[in-house]
Amino acid sequence: MTDAAPQKTTFKPRIFSGIQPSGGLTLGNYLGALKRFAEKQNEGIETIYCLVDLHAITVWQDPDRLRQQTYEAAAAFIASGVDPRRSILFNQSQVSAHAELGWIFNCVARLGWMNRMTQFKDKAGKHTEQVSLGLYAYPSLMAADILAYHATMVPVGEDQKQHVELTRDIAQKFNHDYGVDFFPVTEPLIEGAATRVMSLRDGTRKMSKSDPSDASRINLTDDADTIATKFRKAKTDPEPLPDSVEGLQDRPDARNLVNIYAALADLTPAEVIAQYGGQGFGAFKPALADLAVAKLEPISAEMKRLMADTAELDRILGDGADRADAIAQPILDRAYDIVGMIRSRARAR
Ligand code: AQP
């Protein structure tokens, strides 16, 4: 979008990603994000993970439920293997640099860029006059989340690719307009067999925590019976599974279930087809349900244990916010300085 000069600064590799505590987390959030967040801790790169509560309020949230959902999301991160000693884990609103840098980026991002964001169009639907201004500005706050840490990599599901591309455009335009090489041009990391887990009721729509149909998703807090029932009732077609992955091309519901199996079992879709090709859903769905229960039950049990001690979750989020703030505040101070704001207080520190 901009004709920025190539980057000369070498930025320290750093991973940032976030999840909205806008409801109970789903299998889509787990496979597309949480599971990979935990794996990324083993790659020798600093990892920063955020519960993006400021993003959550872009649509209405009952305050008590939002608090509860934020604790629950924190528990889901830890139960999925994010270790708050190895990663920084915190909620966004405790680090003011996100909102402050978000404002600067509102003044960098162009309306034309925002108008192209498909997630806004999906979420606003026909009611573009009625939704919040925050929902529209969501991607520039997301750019601030990432760039307040000079993060170089963002593991996300496929649905967030466009927002990470916008983050790159904002970084490049800021650097170009102010003649600096201050913000990195961040890479999205979209990896694995489940970069886009689809609804169990409609294989052409994303599995989403805010879908009105609970049967469309597996929640991380669902018990074994509920998981089995939801997979048993998942929409499929009458054909058996094909003998090759290519045979799944025009079968979105079947492809979704194969991809979910592959991601849960750490296999490729081809390896799943090698095992189940030619078999009907009567055999495949129970096998998938058993696998999902085996993987998710320990997570939901650990979430329950963690949720019983919200004081400990508060301690973890507070400590994470202090560590996040120590990285973000100097970057924000420098950004203000570049833009031309007087920083007398920062200089006195
Ligand atoms: N269905 C999915 N498949 C793969 N990855 C997914 N993610 C979300 N849904 C899927 C990934 O989870 C991370 C956090 O997403 P989010 O909760 O912040 O926002 P979202 O993408 O808008 O997710 P939802 O569930 O659809 O939330 P609501 O319903 O509240 O809008 C991201 O990395 C995302 O890619």
Image: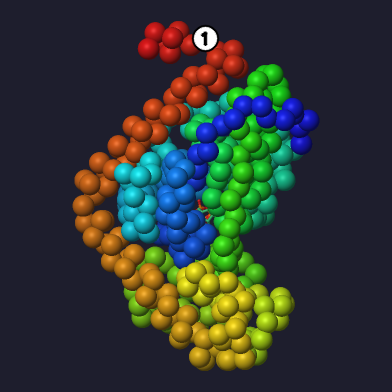
Along the line of sight, which residue is nearer the eye, 235 or 303? Answer: 303
Residue 319 in view of the camera: yes
Q: Which residue is mark 1?
A: 342
Q: Secondary structure at mark 1?
A: loop
- Estimate the x, y position of residue 118 in percent, counting from the top left: 68, 51
- Residue at 47% over, 80% down: 288
- Residue at 28% over, 62% down: 302
The quadrant of the image that shows the C terminus is top left
Along the line of sight, which residue is nearer the eye, 246 or 167? Answer: 246
- Residue at 55% over, 85% down: 275
Judge left or right: residue 250 versus residue 263: right
> Residue 225 appears in which quarter of the rendering?
bottom left
Identify whether 88 is placed above or below 193: above
Judge left or right: residue 52 versus residue 279: left
- Estimate the x, y position of residue 51 in percent, counting from the top left: 42, 46
Residue 124 in view of the camera: no
Q: In the image, what residue type sits under mark 1?
A: Ile
Judge left or right: residue 237 versus residue 297: right
- Estimate the x, y position of residue 282 in percent, counting from the top left: 52, 91
- Residue at 34% over, 65% down: 299
Residue reaching furthest to the right: 3
